Image (cartoon, rainbow, N blue to C red):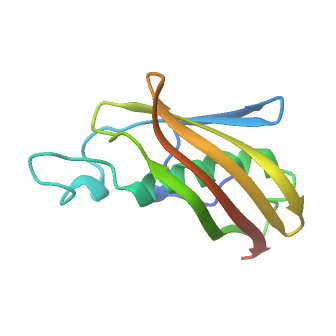
Amino acid sequence: MGILPHRDNMLLLDDARHEDGIAIGHYTVRGDEFFLQGHFPDNPIVPGVILCEILAQSACVLMQDALGEGKLPVYTGLNNVRFRSPVKPGDTVEAQCRIKRAKHPFYFAEGTITVDGRLCVSAEFSFAITEA
């Protein structure tokens, strides 16, 4: 919460850290999240866009120095996104991301989401650090 501006229902990380240039974030899907209410009745699956948001939020720990007061990270692109396995209530996702290149205020990253070692999402993405 000291790095990300997200709150309430859109803060999608339970914890995040960085090790050797890799961001590692975790989120346990409780089952009562707003995005599961209609996606899908009797068979809830975390929407892909939410999984992509978890990737982006995880990557922000790598740029915490650039995310000071009055700064806001915003998506600028998603490329080569692949959804390989569904994420369901009770799953704990692990996001791993790295910055491939940066030219402030733009950052280009790649990442994966796994559950218990099972690859669920892989993606390349970019974002910019803007004034809030």
Tell me the quarter of the picture where residue 66 sits.
bottom right
As drawn, 80 above or below 25: below
Which residue appears farthest toward the bottom when viewing the image?
A: 131
Which residue appears farthest toward the top when viewing the image?
A: 116
Residue at image position (81%, 50%) is 100
Q: Position of residue 52 (x, y in %)?
A: 51, 55
Residue at image position (31%, 38%) is 30
Which one is in front, 119 or 95? Answer: 119
The C terminus - image quarter: bottom right
Q: Position of residue 47 (x, y in %)?
A: 34, 55
Tell me the quarter of the picture where residue 31 sits.
top left
**Residue 66 visible in image:** yes
**Residue 71 visible in image:** no
Tell me the quarter of the picture where residue 73 sits.
bottom right
The answer to whether residue 66 is left or right of residue 87 is right
Which one is in front, 117 or 62? Answer: 117
